[in-house]
Image: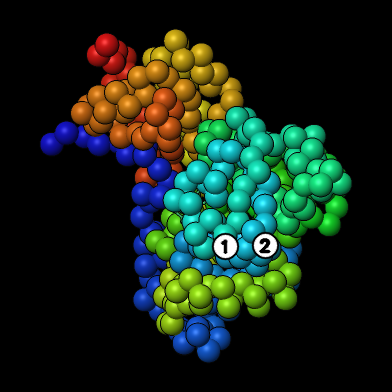
Amino acid sequence: MTRTVDLRSDTVTQPTPEMREAMARAVVGDDGFGDDPTVRDLEERFAEIVGKEAALFVPSGVMANQIAVRILTRPGDVIVAGRHQHLVSFEMGASARNASVQFALVEDDAGEVGVDDVMDIVDAHLDHQVAISMVSLENTHMFAGGAPWDLTRLDALARALGETPVHLDGARLFNAAVATGQSPRAIAASATTVMACLSKGLCAPVGSLLAGPAALMRAARVERKRLGGAMRQVGVLAAAGLVALDTMVDRLAEDHARARRVAQLLAGAFPESGFDPATCRTNIVAFDHPQARQIVHELRARGVWGDTVAPRRVRFVTHAGISDDDLDFLAEVLADFVPAT
Ligand SMILES: Cc1ncc(COP(=O)(O)O)c(C=O)c1O
């Protein structure tokens, strides 16, 4: 059988044996009535970790982002966001569909957005333009190759924004924390709402968390219901989430180290891309190449699975299912790999 090394995404991770045991043992109740103690534990735990008053367990990262948009905006409002953010480009137009909002986009090629770029839009309400109701940021930034924000610049942006609410898409917040040595609480401090996914590098089977001020999280609970995301005996999933927070955060450093090796191997195999492997700081390797789709297609035939996130952009992601031996195999495959012209 052909060997497969699956570097498409960290969403392909499997729940650990400890998670499966915790799921089987979980004490559950009807979360629609607030009766599920395991869900309450998970929500309280996450709120504490990110330093917010309250949190809400939701089925997916997209739902967490969409709820944030609905509680921080009203129909017709404008959100400032980086043009490559998940909220903008990878949620199938959900913000327009669910919340009737539009985006004012700024450059985010390297992940971060510039203070001046954002403030030019925010301050334009003084020049007869629409007032901005929220700013969305992503940390780590998926499209930019898992780039973590520099905390000084994140805080400087938040200071410039003053009262304008910030939503932080921290699908990979814990990767950002591990890579920068900053706590999740420090990273989330300047955000009004913050979300993180349990089902990516942390290996839980399902679930994301949204946190923020208690009044906003009460509103978030209503929006979750409206979106069909209220669940019942969902402590079986929350139990896996608690194990994820307890046992899977520190090991993300291993994924980051392996991603650096993947970056070096790919930079060596595709020098024409100009990709600098030193830009890889977390678990995602992404770079532009004119033959991106062909590369992904042909590598897959050799057992190495990656993905494209734009017509000319490849992405490879490390996670708990990838070993050093897998990377030796990647090195072998790349050693004589040339995409057909
Ligand atoms: C940055 C970012 N935000 C949000 C999401 C959405 O998460 P989910 O797939 O759980 O809906 C993803 C998922 O890939 C992501 O990479």
Is 304 on the left or on the right of 240, as rendered? left
Q: What element carries label 2?
A: loop
Q: In which quarter of the image is residue 299?
A: top left
The residue indicated by pointer 2 is 73
Q: Residue furthest front?
A: 128
Question: Of label 1 and label 2, which has the lower sequence position?
Answer: 2
Q: Is residue 160 above or below residue 309?
A: below
Please name the residue shown 46% across and 87% down the image: 30
Amino acid type, label 2: Thr
Is 54 on the left or on the right of 268, as rendered? right
**CA neighbours of label 2 inside 10 A, class few (<14), some (14 to 19), many (20+):** some
The residue indicated by pointer 1 is 99
What is the number of callouts on the image?
2
Q: Is residue 258 above or below residue 338?
A: below
Question: Residue 88: x and y, percent?
Answer: 54, 46
Question: Residue 95: x and y, percent?
Answer: 54, 56
Q: Quadrant of residue 328?
A: top left
Q: Are marks 1 and 2 in contact (CB under 8 Å)?
A: yes
Question: Residue 195: x and y, percent?
Answer: 60, 58
Residue 30 seen in render: yes
Amino acid type, label 1: Ala
Q: What element carries label 1?
A: helix
Q: Quadrant of the C terminus?
A: top left
